[in-house]
Image (cartoon, grey):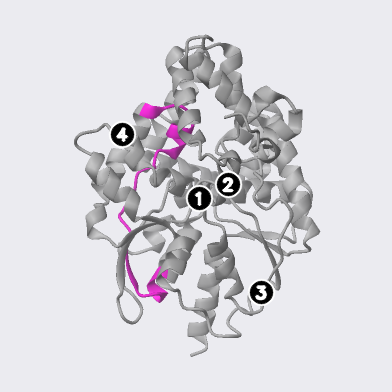
Amino acid sequence: MHCGMCLPTCPTYAETGRERNSPRGRIALMRAVADRELNVTTSFAEEMSYCLGCLACTTACPAGVDYTTLLETARAHVESSGITATPKRTFVRWFTMGWLFKKPRLLRLAGRLLWLYQVTGFQRAFRKLRLTSLLPKRIRELEPSTPKIQRHFSDTLIPEITLARGEKRYRVALLTGCVQDLVFSDVNHATAQVLAENGCEVVTPRTQFCCGSLHAHNGDQENAHILARRQIDTIDPERFDAIISNAAGCGSHLKHYDRLLAEDPRYAARAKAWSLKVRDVSEWLIEIGFRKPHAGTGATAPHIVTYHEACHLCHGQKISKQPREILRAISNVELRECAESTWCCGSAGIYNITQPSTSAWLQMRKLGHLKATGATLVTTANPGCHLQIENGLRATGDTQIEVVHPVVLLAKAYRTEIARR
């Protein structure tokens, strides 16, 4: 493709103005490697890593170029070439993607230890005594962004089967995620409540596996395949009307299990059935005609709300109107649009770790637009975006602005409605 309609939508091209930092430029590089006109070099690897993977280019592209597959394939090719391998990098990738995120019980144990570190005051003392200065430079820079771990994980908050309130119309499976389970189990709880309020019997399997999006987006195709198979073995798509995700990045990947396992003779058909059943929670609620809370039940919500569109929801899944419809259905909530709502906030999976400079630039750009709305509450539907915006607000001293998932506000409205009966 040569039209260049993707260029104005690409954050990295906006930052540098260089062709190589645009989707068109990266595709040209990929084509050159595929045609063996260019070897896989460190420069090529760095360019693939510099891409946010925000997929804004796919929304802009008039020809429907599948940039997602191109980027994931290119990154996998970089990893298989070994061009970026160092002992440190190899160990970090093995420890995180190859071990920790493949073992849900181990990940929960790590989360519980971090929770104890936070609630016992050790974290506060560690910072107050400036012991963070003893940490390696990169870890010292990342330490302030350490997410707050929830006291209760999803299995404690949500029963394995949540009965529908009133007439049962649907039977759905709820995905609790990995980071979502540790940091935003309250969002999972709210999701189960909202689904039950709308006639869904909600099945929440215990101790679920990571969906593999972290692996696929970072060139680890082997483990992405393993985790996709484990998900399908855990949740049989034929038993449910829908499989519900409330995390944009995960949902976008989950909907592509059919593509991921297309060459697997044992799982191809089941993966296709799986992909057809996956729905983002906002998508599903609009699809089934969710019940609007009675007037006055949104009184506990802030009056002025704005919405940041997670890249893998609006660009990856083409879901943009649905979360807004949910927010507008809650009384006493005034939704104010922010400029560049579909632009990446700089989180982009682990981009804030691998590309801190560009990530910080995008974070500040996003915060400026959000604050300009005058909103006291920012809503977004992805854990990475949530943390990126929350950390940015904390760093700039804006403690009066709260960040929540849209479904949390809807759940609060339903609870207020029930309490007033």
Relative height, residue 142 to residue 273 (above, below): above
Alpha-carbon distance for marks 4 and 1? 21 Å
Q: 34 or 126: nearer the eye?
A: 34
Contact, CB < 8 Å: mark 4 with mark 1?
no
3D distance between C-alphas at marks 2 and 3: 24 Å
Q: Which residue is mark 3?
A: 333
The residue sitting at 43% across, 33% down in the picture is 216
Marks 1 and 2: CB-CB under 8 Å?
A: yes
Q: Write down the region rendered in magenta.
A: 195-221
**Callout 2: 10 Å neighbours few (<14), some, many (20+)?**
many
Which callout, 1 or 2, points at the residue further toward the start of the chain?
1
Of the pair 418 and 24, the residue shown nearer to us: 24
Q: Amino acid at mark 2?
A: Cys
Type of residue at label 3? Val
Residue located beneath label 4 in the image = 226
Task: Report which residue position mark 2 lands on.
Answer: 311
Numbered circle sitting on residue 248: 1
Element marked by disc 4: helix
Residue 91 as seen in the image, left or right of residue 200: right
52 displayed left or right of 90: right
Q: Are marks 2 and 3 in contact (CB under 8 Å)?
A: no
